Image: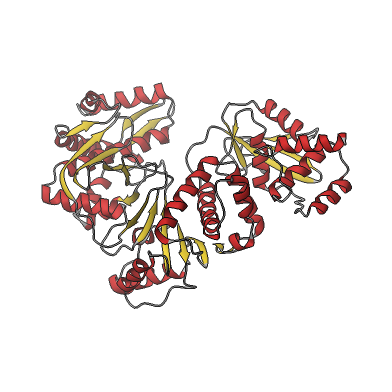
């Protein structure tokens, strides 16, 4: 009886709600861990688990490992990449090794330096050890922000799993029971990522949701709001977006035939996931006919596209009928600190107030052309991206003017003195930007942290500008390539800001509303879809 009591106590500590459930495969994993910790023989553990009817998981998956590492505490946080965890409290390597040895009951943990051996990270150490003949490894990363590709996929796939479960009749008020329902083949068997996902895939997503309450709650609110629009009927398939889906292939081919150009799928229909109530998309001869089919589907039939943004349950239909009327009263052109990147265009007018479009580089390269990103006040996620080249569809020649000041060849860099100077091309570029700033400065306003004197000083003359660059680069410790990339972005944004702020009202309507609608996927040929945020 003492042994049973010890097992139950250890088991209850390891499950999230303190109430072990032998029918929950996730809890069965924790039961095995508890008995191993109490040094119970493997034969006894396997027999007990078999008697419970649980699924024995003999290997620790990357997701299991990350979950277990994070549960060790000490400021360790989850991460978009399953092969690493965040080191939020700057834990030392030696302290992390101590935690691993204690948690996994091992004597040896190897540390592999960044960029050496099997460690693919250029910045963070890889820790490697062996448990019961299985090699385990994890990277201890710094405080990493933003959504990585792996986490984005988790969010999309877990949304589909939650939606399937809710339409199957699962009760979200009891999280433990709901998580267990995700492992029902009638739920996960309808979810597709290329092909049907496996129970192991579902188990991994369930574990991810169990450890991410904010995403669980966000999914539930969004799905409940969505179900209130389309009903409870389960779809035949819940599918992650893929360029190879029949609906995307058809749209691309129809657009090519009609417009003799390549279709940007995200601007036609930016769906992250699709619901198939029909087994497949019927054949159409015109893009308009396909769009009408997708519009009709929004009532809870056919094929439905859904764009996902993290939020609080707001559900809206984009391109669902009558187009919004936009009328610009004015646009504020805003710049922040000189040694930053963005230029912000803040909209005011009918159906526009609160919307903005910001331009900057996204990949950190001096050879990168700036692009736009839309935002709306009160929204938790960006409202769409748009390449600068699109602007020429509304007024030709703008991209060419911006490109004239693009690039890292603006500077020469003395590696001995660590100082920048303007190259021959850089002098020409500087004069173009100087001229653009003179046209812009009376019309621009300052974003938070911005100081107009910085800009005035920078464009007095090229000597003052170079002195400012060198002083800032040395004081901030920014690397050569990053300085070149930042100035390339700032030069581009000043030129673009100068052009936009000097457009006539008619041109402003055409260019800036055109860009906004394109970024929000509201062009005339864009397709109807739900937007959840």
> Is residue 283 depicted above or below 156 in this figure?
below
Res. 97 image quadrant: top right
User: What residue is rendered at 37% in x and 38% in y?
Assistant: 485
Q: Is residue 520 visible?
A: yes
Rendered position, 58 above or below 294? above
Q: Is residue 54 above or below residue 18?
A: below
Q: How is the image coloured?
A: secondary structure
Where's residue 273, x and y in %?
A: 46, 58
Closest to the observer, 444 or 39: 39
User: Quick check: 325 left or right of 232?
Assistant: left
Which residue is at 47% across, 53% downward? Answer: 223
Give the percent coordinates (x, y) of residue 307. Answer: 41, 55
Say which residue appears at 38% left-offset and 67% top-offset. Answer: 297
> As drawn, is 52 to the left or to the right of 286?
right
| Residue 117 in view in this figure | no
Say which quadrant the N terminus sits in: top right
| Rendered location of residue 475, percent (x, y) | 40, 21
Left or right: residue 258 compared with residue 144: left
Instruction: Looking at the picture, tell me which residue is in the foreground, 165 or 381.
Output: 165
Q: How many marks?
A: 0
Q: Quadrant of residue 321?
A: bottom left
Q: Is residue 35 left or right of residue 288?
A: right
Q: Nearer the viewer, residue 255 or 20?
A: 20
């Amino acid at each position: 009886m003492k042994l049973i009591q010890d097992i139950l106590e250890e088991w209850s500590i390891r499950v999230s709600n303190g109430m072990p459930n032998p029918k929950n495969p996730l809890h069965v994993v924790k039961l095995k861990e508890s008995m191993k910790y109490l040094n119970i023989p493997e034969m006894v553990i396997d027999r007990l688990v078999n008697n419970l009817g649980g699924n024995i998981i003999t290997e620790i998956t990357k997701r299991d490992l990350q979950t277990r590492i994070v549960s060790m505490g000490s400021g360790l946080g989850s991460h978009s990449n399953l092969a690493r965890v965040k080191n939020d409290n700057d834990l030392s390597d030696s302290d992390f090794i101590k935690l691993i040895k204690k948690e996994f009951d091992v004597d040896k943990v190897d540390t592999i330096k960044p960029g050496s051996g099997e460690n693919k990270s250029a910045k963070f150490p890889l820790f490697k050890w062996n448990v019961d003949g299985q090699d385990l490894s994890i990277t201890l990363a710094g405080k990493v922000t933003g959504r990585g590709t792996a986490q984005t996929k988790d969010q999309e796939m877990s949304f589909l799993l939650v939606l399937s479960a809710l339409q199957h009749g699962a009760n979200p008020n009891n999280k433990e029971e709901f998580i267990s329902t995700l492992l029902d083949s009638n739920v996960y068997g309808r979810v597709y990522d290329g092909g049907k996902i496996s129970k192991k895939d579902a188990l991994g997503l369930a574990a991810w949701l169990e450890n991410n309450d904010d995403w669980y709650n966000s999914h539930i609110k969004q799905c409940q709001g969505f179900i209130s629009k389309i009903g409870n009927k389960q779809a035949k398939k819940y599918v992650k977006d893929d360029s190879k889906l029949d609906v995307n292939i058809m749209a691309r081919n129809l657009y090519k035939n009609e417009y003799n150009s390549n279709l940007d799928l995200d601007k036609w229909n930016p769906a992250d996931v699709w619901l198939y109530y029909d087994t497949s998309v019927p054949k159409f001869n015109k893009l308009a006919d396909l769009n009408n089919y997708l519009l009709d589907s929004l009532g809870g039939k056919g094929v439905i596209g859904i764009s996902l943004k993290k939020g609080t349950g707001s559900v809206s239909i984009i391109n669902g009928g009558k187009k919004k009327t936009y009328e610009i009263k004015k646009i504020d052109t805003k710049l922040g600190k000189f040694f930053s990147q963005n230029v912000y265009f803040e909209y005011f007018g009918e159906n526009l107030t609160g919307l903005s479009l910001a331009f900057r580089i996204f990949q950190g390269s001096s050879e990168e052309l700036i692009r736009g990103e839309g935002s709306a006040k009160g929204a938790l996620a960006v409202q769409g991206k748009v390449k600068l080249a699109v602007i020429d569809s509304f007024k030709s020649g703008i991209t060419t003017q911006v490109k004239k000041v693009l690039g890292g060849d603006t500077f020469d860099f003395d590696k001995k003195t660590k100082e920048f100077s303007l190259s021959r091309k850089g002098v020409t570029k500087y004069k173009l930007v100087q001229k653009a700033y003179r046209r812009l400065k009376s019309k621009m306003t300052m974003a938070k942290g911005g100081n107009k004197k910085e800009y005035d000083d920078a464009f007095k003359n090229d000597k003052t500008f170079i002195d400012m660059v060198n002083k800032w680069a040395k004081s901030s410790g920014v690397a050569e390539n990053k300085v070149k990339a930042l100035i390339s972005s700032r030069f581009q944004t000043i030129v673009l800001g100068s052009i936009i702020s000097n457009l006539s009202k008619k041109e402003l309507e055409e260019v800036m509303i055109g860009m906004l609608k394109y970024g929000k996927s509201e062009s005339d040929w864009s397709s109807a879809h739900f937007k959840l945020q």
